[in-house]
Amino acid sequence: MYLLDASVLIVAHNTYYAIDRVPEFWNWLRHHGNNGEVVLPEEIYAEVEDGNDDLAAWMAEDESKDCLKFGEEADSAHVTHVLAQYGGNLSEDDLIKIGKDPFLIAAGYADIPGRTVVTAEVSKPTRVGANRHIPNVCDDCGVNWINPIEFLRQLDFKTGWTP
């Protein structure tokens, strides 16, 4: 199961796979969502759906929600463990900066086999506190992660794709 970060969809829509230019990509996502292979934790889903562009409108469609919104509630112990990887004494501003990333990482937690976080963020191991990136926190938690290009390779996306 692939757990998508908001960055994956935002970057895809804003660059190479705009909804109005490459609709087969978005149909491909729904197809894999219907198969239970691609999901977004509810907190991450809300980040994208709350926008006011074509991507947000696509996310708001029942067909997208039904297949891509992960129905599993966040495990508070996992979220707490993930937050600890950002360091102690996090301020309110730190928590705002970190955003919903701990929910994404917690959904892919190491004691749940077969889950992989997909993020467009790149590893920056020297970052500390609220500036840490998803790949580095995933590494500290033992959570598998990949970038969007590897995700496309693993699920074999090609333009012209049809179900």
Image (spheres, helix red, strand yellow):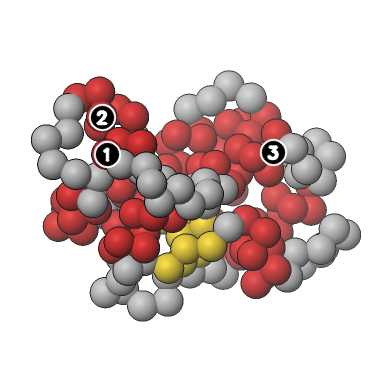
* Mark pair 1, 2: CA separation: 8 Å
Where residue 107 appears, as percent x and y from the top left, is: 33, 59
SS label for mark 3: helix
Label 2 element class: helix
Image x and y of residue 9, in percent: 60, 44
Q: Position of residue 93 (x, y in %)?
A: 25, 23
Residue denoted by label 1: 129
Q: Amino acid at mark 2?
A: Asp
Q: Earlier in the sequence, mark 1 or mark 2?
A: 2
Most distant residue in the right direction: 160
User: Mark 3 is on which residue type?
Assistant: His
* CA separation in Å, label 1 and label 3: 29 Å
Q: Crowding near pointer 2: few (<14 within 10 Å), some, many (20+)?
A: some
Q: Nearer the viewer, residue 64 or 13?
A: 13
Q: Position of residue 159 (x, y in %)?
A: 85, 58
The Cα atoms of the two marked residues, 2 and 3, are separated by 28 Å
Label disc, if present, on residue 4 of the rendered structure: none
Residue 163, can we see it? yes
Q: Which mark is residue 13?
A: 3
Kindly report which numbered mark, 2 or 3, lies closer to the viewer in this rendering. 2
Residue at the image position 70 percent from the left and 34 percent from the top: 14
Q: Quadrant of residue 154?
A: bottom right
**Mark 2 touches mark 3? (CB < 8 Å):** no
Residue at 68%, 43% in the rendered image: 12
In this view, 92 is above or below 3: above
Closer to the eye: label 1 or 3: 1
Q: Nearer the viewer, residue 16 or 139?
A: 139
Residue that badge 2 annotates: 94
Q: Earlier in the sequence, mark 2 or mark 3?
A: 3
Asked if residue 108 shows in the view, the reply is no
